[in-house]
Image (tube, rainbow, N blue to C red):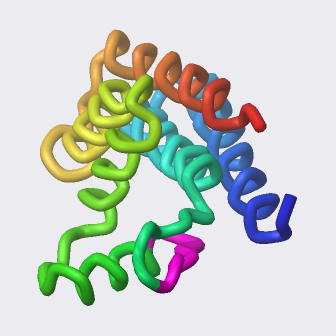
Amino acid sequence: MSRRKEIKLQHAIHNRELCLAIDKMEKYPDWVVTVAFYSVLHFVDYKIFPLQMKDNNDTAINNIMQYADYQEKRNGIRKSNHKHRENLVRKNLPDISEYFNSLLRFSSSARYYNYQVDDKTKQFSIQILKKIEKICSKK
């Protein structure tokens, strides 16, 4: 495993551990959901990258920022990294796409609209994290 991939996996695990620690506090469900999403984001990146593009140059893409730049040069349109990752998950990890998108919505809502997250959403977010970790951690 490359050093870059190892760091990505360790970051995902670090965020998962923080998510579960915050959950034990039983005080900040919005942060449980938010940190669960950021953990999942790193597990997904660990699984997807590096990505070999099927172009004339067989371009190797190592992270979401390189992918966004590559797509902008090809299409002339800049999208958010979250939107690119959403598309990459749908294409490369279809079994978790619906879960990933749900957690993205829960996290965005908790961060920007309503920090009062109900227990059902918090628990479902942790279940999503564990499911995606299991799928993305496989070699």
Q: Is residue 121 above or below residue 93?
A: above
Residue 61 lies in the magenta-colored region: yes
Give 72 or 25, whichever is nearer the viewer: 72
Instruction: Using residue 7 as the reference point, say whether residue 94 is left or right of it.
Output: left
Residue 75's image quarter?
A: bottom left
Give x and y (percent) for residue 65.
43, 77
In terms of depth relative to the viewer, which is nearer, 35 or 134? 134
- The residue located at (72%, 44%) in the rendering is 13
Relative side of 128 to 108, left or right: right
Q: Residue furthest top?
A: 120
Magenta residues, start to end: 57-64
Asked whether residue 79 is drawn in magenta, I would say no
Give residue 29's position: percent from left, percent from top: 41, 29
**Residue at horizontal 49 percent and vertical 85 percent from the top:** 57
Q: Main secondary structure of the magenta part?
A: loop
Relative image position of residue 77 (x, y in whole percent)? 13, 80
* Up-down relation of residue 35 to residue 71 (above or below): above
